[in-house]
Image (cartoon, helix red, strand yellow):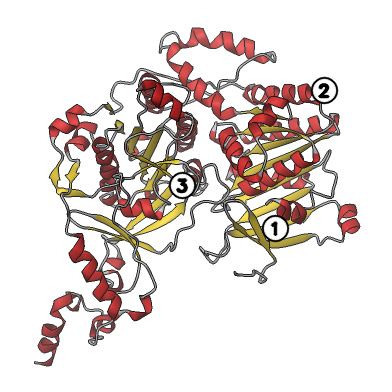
Amino acid sequence: MASNVQRTKSKIPFIPGTKPSAQNAQLLISTGIPSLDHVIGGGLPVGSILLIEEDTYNSYAKIMLKYFMAEGIVSSHSLLIASRDTKPTQLLAELPAVAVSSSTKSKTQATDEQMKIAWRYQNMKIVDASPTGGQVFGRFYDLTKTMDSADIEHADIIKWDGNDLKCKAESFENNAYVDLLKTVQETLKHGQFLVSDNPEKRKILRIAIQSLGSRLWLCNTEESTRCDLLKFLYCFRSLLRSSYAVATITVPAQNFDNTDALVERIEHLSDTAVRLESFAGSAKETNPIFRDYHGLLHIKKLSAFNTLAPHNPESTDLAFKLRRKKFVIEVLHLPPELDDTAQREQDDSSAIGSCGSGNSKKLLEF
Amino acid sequence: MTDSVCSALGIDRVDMCGKMILIEEQHGSDANFIVNSVLSGALEKGHGICLVLFHNTFGHYHNVGMKMGYNLNVLKERGQVTVVEPMKIAATNVEDLGHDSVDAANVDLSSPQQKSIDDTGFPDIMKLDKTLVRQLYTPLKNKCYEMLQSRDSIVIIIDDLSHMFDMRLSLRDVWYYVRYLWSLMQFEPTISVCIMTHTYKADPDSCQPDMIAIGIKHMADLIVTVKSLSTGHASDISGKMNVRWKISSIRRKYHWAEKTTYLYKLMDRQIKLFAPGGANLS
């Protein structure tokens, strides 16, 4: 068995929960959201960093991170969870369970109907949200159910909450960064995730870091806060590049003082970067154009691993919506314009309820 | 493959020895294709290559090279290509971290520092060390001199100088690094330097990566600026590229304009260049 694995290792090693990229034979893992995988070119390349710039209230970025972790547990990857804001144990306890054969049929029917009405968009594809291929790659998760605690206990999980800092380095002011770096490095080494290692069974390490650079990561001065964060990411990036690990980091980008392009520098240090813009609390919440969605997804950067050209998405106007059993990213399109155009012209919040249009008309007449 | 880019830059005709190329990668674009073009152009001419990799790994360049028709691993064994990988240094530094625990830190600090001042030292970016820039530069210099014994000319390629700021080096330090390279080039006129750096279009008075780019623009002989389309994402075009030759004698010789603009489209195995407005969309 072992020799078999080693012989094939030189080409593409088979690791559960991975698939080779169709474009450049890069090994990919799923983000836990099939439609996001599709948008970013199939999945996250092994050795890369996915940066999620949090939405205003950090509700959706947190869910995306949970999907990433849940997918790791289900595909029996190892997991390293680091968070100073929320206790890693609490994050684990809130992980969603795999959704059992969701009602994809009714959903596609609904979209087909929409297509008939909006004839202009007939040729536009909705991002294919269904996982394909014989091997399971990416699943849907049910947010109403939490994952079985036995599954979580069974998984190989390392938690880091930044309470007990052992390491220290001169060039970092905040030792939490040093300690986290060291934890990552030790995990990579002990779990034999390094490229130079030759374990019997190759596994993937998923690293989830929540709200990196939030208030709990601050240093005494703004300058050193900035330097520490960038330096951490640079070291982190160099660690990941030589290992079978993938990281997802959420960053409260809105809280940063961005006069010196700090957010852009963080994006440059990561490999794939997306920004979430949720409609909650913004004027777009009541805008009828966006009534089908919960927020917009902006692609800031796509990884170009071992190739000249990064993945070219079909469209960059993307929106997301959160259902109980599904988090879907779709190409943004306007809602179908039905015969009662009052909906859009009046911009009345009472008219937004989709089925109430007839009733509201009556109300207006009498 | 990369021929179109090389001829657009003019590096296939001009003797680049003793000249400096600056590749400015504005945020939102990817100028890695220019680095690869310079690399493959230099390989075609038979120059030696010294890769200084802050951003991408050697594996990345090897894989891209395999698509372009050269094998960097083989060339490295033959001695035509040599690599300095500060990224690997960073990873090793993290690994060495735990050895000095909180108390013993000060004791351990002094000895490697002493060692690193002479040329055999190993840079440690985890420490605040004023000589770090020299420690990063010295291996590069040594490798260049080593290579000069067997090769006539060398191209030094720096993949993303702006990452030096991420290592907490100051503007002065990074500027010293550039000046070290500059003086190396003056001492050995068969060396040419190609620096790629990332810029952000932020406040040029305080954003260090932007500042260093302005500084190098004054020194460089050829400036290539790569930017994304200001109109947003397009499926036919990846971005825009400006080429500026600063040596007027060369411009006169080849009848080049001071500044030429191209649009480019990146594909897996090739790069297409278009004049603005002249994209043939097939």
Task: Report the residue that reaches farthest toward the left.
Answer: A366
Say if B194 sits above or below B131 in the image: below
Q: Is residue A279 above or below residue A53?
A: below
Residue that numbered label 3 is attached to: A263
Observer-nearest residue: A66 or B215? Answer: A66
Q: Nearer the viewer, mark 3 or mark 2?
A: 2
Q: Position of residue B140 (x, y in %)?
A: 70, 26
Query: In this rendering, would A94 be left or right of B49?
Result: left
Q: Quadrant of the C terminus of chain A?
A: bottom left
**Quick check: A181 left or right of A100?**
right
Q: Residue at x 53, y 26 (%)?
A: B90
Q: Tell me which amino acid carries mark 2.
A: Gln
- Front-most of A284 and B67? B67
Could you tell me residue B33's position as x and y percent?
63, 48
Residue B94 visible (yes or no): yes
Q: Amino acid at mark 3?
A: Val
Where's residue A311, x and y in %? 48, 53
Say the numbered circle drawn on residue B242.
1
Q: Chain of mark 1?
A: B
Given the image, what chain letter belongs to the residue carrying mark 3?
A
Mark 3 on the same chain as mark 1 = no
Q: Pinpoint the chain carrying mark 2.
A: B
Examine the rendered structure and indicate whether residue B54 appears above or below residue A23: above
Q: Residue A210 falls in which quadrant of the image?
A: top left
Identify the secondary structure beneath mark 2: loop
To which residue does mark 2 refer? B149
Q: Nearer the viewer, residue A150 or B216?
A: A150
Q: In screen coordinates, is B209 left or right of A244?
A: right
Query: Sequence-wise, which precedes: disc 1 or disc 2?
Result: 2
Dot 1, crowdedness within 10 Å: few (<14), some or many (≥20)? some
Q: CA distance from mark 1 to mark 2?
A: 36 Å
